[in-house]
Structure formats: structure tokens, C-alpha cells
Image: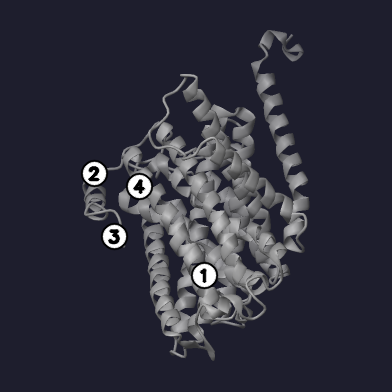
Amino acid sequence: MRTEGPDFVDASLSTERTTPPAVDAEGYTKALGNRQVQMIAIGGAIGVGLFLGAGGKLATAGPSLVLSYALCGLAAFFVMRALGELVLHRPTAGSFVSYAREFIGPWAGFASGWMYWVNWAMTGVAEITAVGIYVHRWLPTVPQWLTALAALGVLLAVNLLSVRLFGELEFWFSVVKVLAIVVFLFVGVAMVLAGAHVGGSAAGVANLTGHAGFFPHGVGVTLMALQAVVFAYSAIELVGIAAGETRDARKVLPRAINGVVWRIAIFYVGSVLLLAMLLPWTAYSDTESPFVTVFSRLGIPAVGDVMNAIVLTAALSSCNSGLYSTGRVLRALADRGEAPAFAGRMSGRHVPYGGILFTSGVYVLGVVLNGVVPHDAFDIATSIASLGVVATWATLVVCQMRLRGAALRGEVVRPSYRMPGAPYTAWATLGFLVLVVVLMAFAGGADRIAFYSLPAIVAVIALGWRAVSARRAARAVPAAADPATE
């Protein structure tokens, strides 16, 4: 895909082939070029939350799910602009963890880093669950946990080899996802305009208001869907973590971030709107990708299987990104004694293998969850992951507010690339994120489980920070004052 002019592929490819990647002070290689960063940004904005989760939510919220995607998309826009302002202030692989330490305090860096890890740990469980669900279409007799374990093994190997290999794999994963969405948008618009029959029903705007109306189960159900939609938008912040391994980050990243914003509007809101118009909302379910549902009903042989292969690629892509991002964040924490020392280990290929292996251990637990509760694993994982997404987004917004305040006091120079409407848009975004968490308490099933798990997660993180602080205080005491040395 070509979106940013003639240098989109050619310049990046030529640089990668002729110039050895530099190694920065943090030990990372500048191995990701413009071509890869652009696609990582796109890939982060298209995940299994859309390809699988939208089906189940359409089946419960109906056509009004479009409003949930639009509201969350607006919040995501301001979060991305806040991230852009912070990245232009100081690009770093530690991303919001580093910014939280700088603008809020050491405890915030610790808490945000571990909440982000909770996000990706649970997201990875959701992704490998999705892999099992997709493969079940072709191999119904193979256990869901077995295909999930095989997928994890392949992605773990890729991440442990090199960041360039990760970048290449993610590039092509994203190409497949983007092309699939683009094809769907063109085909979907054509079918709606032509009033084509899809699986025995006519496509058209009438599907938005027919079958019990736009709000078939009331406005409340639409609001309850916000948690799942926030999860669908998770990983858009991945481009900020990639900043630490990007050449010419201050030039490349603003374009990538701007690209994410309009892709959210087209790929997410546009896709859900088309899904709601192509088929009655009652045709969708949480056991199959809504895209597969649509294409399977077109009557074209094997087209449903092709789309199933594409959404499988999307799940693998997101899981791949999870291993990449948590490896970097855990190393940033371990370097400060805020994570197990093993998580900070770096290989000779400049890959933080310790953090990657640490996260993969949780993914293995996700494989076990697929064996125990295969039908609930996805919903439980996405609900808990949403808590991490909300924490990450809120951290970015608060850091932007602190950066703006420091600039007004003359302490730092505020970048020209800024969050529009600040500070009012920042406060509005924070209020929206609080609303999402509060609504989870009134939802049922997995959402309520996640909400009531929040105090336990906060308590564990607080105890962890207390232990880290006590260890640091003990190290700061002079040896002469230690009774054990006298």
C-alpha cells in the first residue's frame, strides 16, 4: 500500500539495504524504516477486536454499535495526538512509561508500565483464542488450545530473532489486513448502492432501522459496548513504542500518527456501518468473524475461507505486536529494578528476549484457558485487557497535560505538533475513559469480572511499588549505618 508519496517504499528499502542499523544508548538498533513504521501504525489500528469482536457486539447492540465506534474513535484521536506531542518532545522506546516518570512521577512509570503489560498479556490471550476459533472452521476436530500453542511458537521465534524480522513480518501482516479492509469497503459500498441480496436479504440503509430499530435493545446496551470497542482500538499507541527503534523519528512519526487517525474513521467506523447495512444485525454472532459471515453468504465458492485466512492473519499480527511491545516496556522497567531482572536481558541481536519470554509465559496460560473455557476465553481476556488500554490512554493524556503545563512555565519547549483543543479536550477524554470503566460495573459476564478484578490489580501494583521503593531506600542507606555491617 502506498500512502505517503514516492519515498513511502523506495527510500526506506534503499536505506535498509545499504546502511547498517545504528545502536542507540538504550541498546536498540534503528532497524525500523518509514515503510515499516507506517504499516505498524496501520496494523495497530486494525486488530481482532474489529475482525472478531464486532460480530458479537453487533448481535447484542445492533446497528447502534456504529455510535460506540464513533465515540471511542474520537477519544482515540485525542489520545494519538497527545502521544504525538510527547513523542516529538522526546522519542524513546520506553514510550509512555518514560513520559509518566518524567511528567507525573516514578510511581506512575511503574504503574503504567505494568498496566500496559496487563493489557498486552490479556490481548495476547484473546488473539491466540481468536486463532483457535478461526482454525476451527477448517479443522473442527483439532482442539482450540493446540492451534493457539502452535501460533504462539511461531511468533515467539520471530520476535526473538531480530527487530528487522519483526518489522518485515508485521509489514506484510498489515498489508494483508489493509487490503482486505479496502476490498471489503469497496465491495460493501457497491452492494449497498446496488441493493444486492446477501444471503437472502437485501443490503441497504433499511437494515439500520429495520429489525427492531437502530437501538434494538436500548441505548444502555450501546453504552455497555464501549468497553469492547476500546479494546478494538487498543494497539494504536504501538507506534509510540516503535519510536525508539525508528530512524528520523521526528519526521516519520507525525505522518504515521496522522495516518492512524483517518484510518480509524474509515476502517473501523466505516466497516461497522457497512456490516450493519449489508446484513440484518441478527445475522451476526460471536462465534464467527462478521466479515466471514458476509462473504460466506455471497454464494461465491471459497470466498468465506479466504476471508477467514485474512482475519487469522490479523490475529497473528496483533499477537506479534504484543510480544514486541511488552518486551520493550518490561526492559524499561527492569532497567530500573521495577521488573524481574530476567525481563531486562538483551540478546546479541539487540532483542530484549527476557521481556518477550516473560510475556509469552502468560500467553501459555492463555492456551490453558482455551482448554478449560474455550467459549469464554475471548470475552474474559478482552475485558481485562480493556482496563490496561484505559490506563495507558489516560497516562498519555495526563502526561500531555503536564508537558503543556511545563511549557507554559517555560521549563520545556512544546513541540509544534500538538493535541488540538487542549486542555479541554484532554479533560473530556479523561472523563470518557472513566465512564467506560464505570459502565463495566453495570454490564454482565466478562465485563463485570474485569471490573471487580480492578481492585486486585491495583493492590498488586501498589504492593509491587512499595517493595521497589523499600529496596531502593535500603540501598541508599550508607553501609556504616547498617547494623549488619557493624
Say which element carries label 2: loop
Disc 4 vs disc 1: Cβ atoms closer than 8 Å? no
Q: CA gap, disc 3 to disc 2?
A: 23 Å
Q: Is residue 290 above or below residue 154?
A: below
First in residue order: circle 2 vs circle 4: 2
Res. 312 in view:
no
Residue at 60%, 31% in the rendered image: 337
Q: Amino acid at mark 4?
A: Arg
Which circle, 1 or 2, is nearer the viewer? Answer: 1
Q: Identify the image quadrant of residue 457.
A: top right
First in residue order: circle 4 vs circle 3: 3
Query: For this view, does 302 lie left or right of residue 341?
Result: left
- Residue wearing tag 2: 19
- Residue wearing tag 4: 255
Q: CA gap, disc 3 to disc 1?
A: 25 Å
> Which quadrant: the C terminus?
top right
Between residue 338 and residue 438, name the one nearer to us: 438
Q: Residues within 10 Å of mark 4 (few under 14, many from 20)?
A: some
Residue at 40%, 65% in the rendered image: 178
Residue at 68%, 20% in the rendered image: 473
Between residue 364 and residue 294, name the one nearer to us: 294
- Residue wearing tag 3: 2
